[in-house]
Image: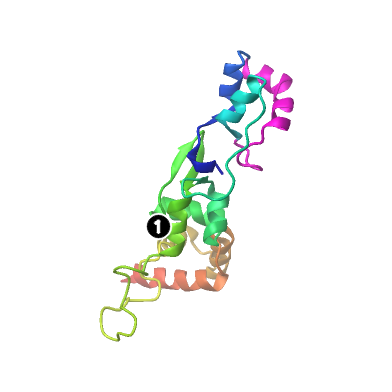
Amino acid sequence: MIPRNRPVTNESDIARQADAPIATWRRRDAPAFRQRVASLFPGSRILIYDLAQAHAYLEGRPIPALPAGEHPDDLLNDEEAAAVLGITASTVRAYAAQGYLAAGTTVYSLRVWPRSDIEERRNNPPGQGKGGGRPAGTKNGPRKAHAYEGDPRLHTAAMSLSAAGDTPRQRIAADLAHQHGGSVRTWERLLTQASRQGQN
């Protein structure tokens, strides 16, 4: 994560500051640099570093510590957002593309979301809180047309059905569960509902 939305940099910019071609810097300087300054997203192919730490390294100063603990302004990648929401990273990306989740911002080609947005989404999923369904204890009022009304996965299911041709529905459901998380049975239900809507 990027702690508290601090300024960041990447290796191309670091090489430019060191007045070296990026290929030369990566071959000659990057190994020592990476031992001292950790990427903010370990395991990601996109290497992003804290700007203050990178400057300290280049200037031969002690590397400052990053702020500890969670903060609403932290920027999370899809894996970190997924861990907060209890879903898969691919589902985070799908939800963001479908408008079910904030689109996030791009930092050096990496999509990130403020922790506050992700926690708000976790704590107040659609259909809960203000304006979400009937107040507790009431029996009258509008009901959903079906259990998955308003669920963005329904659109994904419909698109998969239209592209699947003669592929068995159970196989489509298994593929969707693998790609987006959730159970195969849930995706089978979503596919069934998407099929019904397509026939109306």
Q: Position of residue 170 (x, y in %)?
A: 56, 70
Image position of 23 with respect to 42: above or below? above
User: Residue 9's spot in the image, x, y percent?
Assistant: 55, 29
Disc 1 marks a residue whose amino acid type is Tyr
In this figure, which residue is indicated by the disc labeled 1?
Answer: 100
Looking at the picture, tell me which residue is in the foreground, 44 or 49: 49
The structure's colour scheme is rainbow
29 inside magenta stretch: yes
Screen quadrant of the C terminus: bottom left
Residue at left offset 47%, top offset 47%:
113
When the figure is inspected, residue 146 is found, relative to residue 38, above or below; the finding is: below
Q: Residue at x 57, y 61 (%)?
A: 175
Determine which quarter of the picture holds residue 134: bottom left
The image position of residue 139, as x and y in percent, is 30, 86
Which of 172 and 80 lies nearest the eye of the viewer? 80
Tell me where the magenta segment starts and ends, as one range: 21-46
- Which residue is located at x 62 percent, y 32 percent? 64
In the image: residue 55, left or right of residue 109:
right
Q: Is residue 156 visible?
A: no
Neighbour tally class for label 1: few under 14, some 14-19, many 20 plus, Cα within 10 Å = some
Residue 3 in view, yes or no = yes
Whether 54 is drawn above or below 44: the answer is above
Q: Residue at x 51, y 69 (%)?
A: 187
Q: Quadrant of residue 198?
A: bottom left
